[in-house]
Image: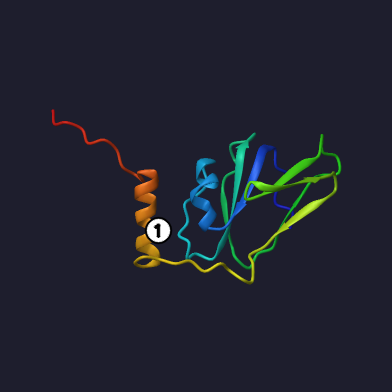
């Protein structure tokens, strides 16, 4: 099913583990790593209605460069391995059948929430003085 033709500076496809960095900076959702999902986050979309979306992990997504596109597109995998996509070409995005295991100090949720708080000062602000 064709969802949309994107007009934006780029698009991020990520796992929940990847959602707390680049995708979050672009306005994407923060998703717990245990949630089996694929996140789609537009980078500076040219329309306000194109927002971050979360798909179940069994969905296979395909991103095409339209045959009438103004130019080619570039694909980066974790900021590396730059590949140029020409008009009419596409890239397929799907969850790996072999997820990477992680090592946790306490448990998955405590480590993740602690990391958000520690690294991003998640939802904290300077305490105000009383009036």
- Name the quadrant of the N terminus: bottom right
Q: Residue at x 39, y 51 (%)?
A: 116
Left/right of residue 95 with respect to residue 127 in the rendered view: right
Up-down: is 62 above or below 108? above
Name the residue furthest bottom: 97
Up-down: is 40 above or below 42? below
On the image, the x and y values in percent for residue 48 come to 58, 37
User: How many numbered markers are drawn?
Assistant: 1
Q: Residue at x 83, y 50 (%)?
A: 89
Left/right of residue 64 with respect to residue 33 in the rendered view: right
User: Camera-side residue: 98 or 66?
Assistant: 98
Q: Which residue is mark 1?
A: 112
Q: How many residues crowd mark 1 within 10 Å: few (<14), some (14–19), many (20+)?
A: some
Residue 32 location, quadrant: bottom left
**Circle 1 — which element?**
helix
Question: How did the renderer colour the structure?
Answer: rainbow
User: Camera-side residue: 81 or 11?
Assistant: 81
Up-down: is 107 above or below 89? below
On the image, the x and y values in percent for residue 11 come to 65, 45
Left/right of residue 103 with respect to residue 78 in the rendered view: left
């Amino acid at each position: 099913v064709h969802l949309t033709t994107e007009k934006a500076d780029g698009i991020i496809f990520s796992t929940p583990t990847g959602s707390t960095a680049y995708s979050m900076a672009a306005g994407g959702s923060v998703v717990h790593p245990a949630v089996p999902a694929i996140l789609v986050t537009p980078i500076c979309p040219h329309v306000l209605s194109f927002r971050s979306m979360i798909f179940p992990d069994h969905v296979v997504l395909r991103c095409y460069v339209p045959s009438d596109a103004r130019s080619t597109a570039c694909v980066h995998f974790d900021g590396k391995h730059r590949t140029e996509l020409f008009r009419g070409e596409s890239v397929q995005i799907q969850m790996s059948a072999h997820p990477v295991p992680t090592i946790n100090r306490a448990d998955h949720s405590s480590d993740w929430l602690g990391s958000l708080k520690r690294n991003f000062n998640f939802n904290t602000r300077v305490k105000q003085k009383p009036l």
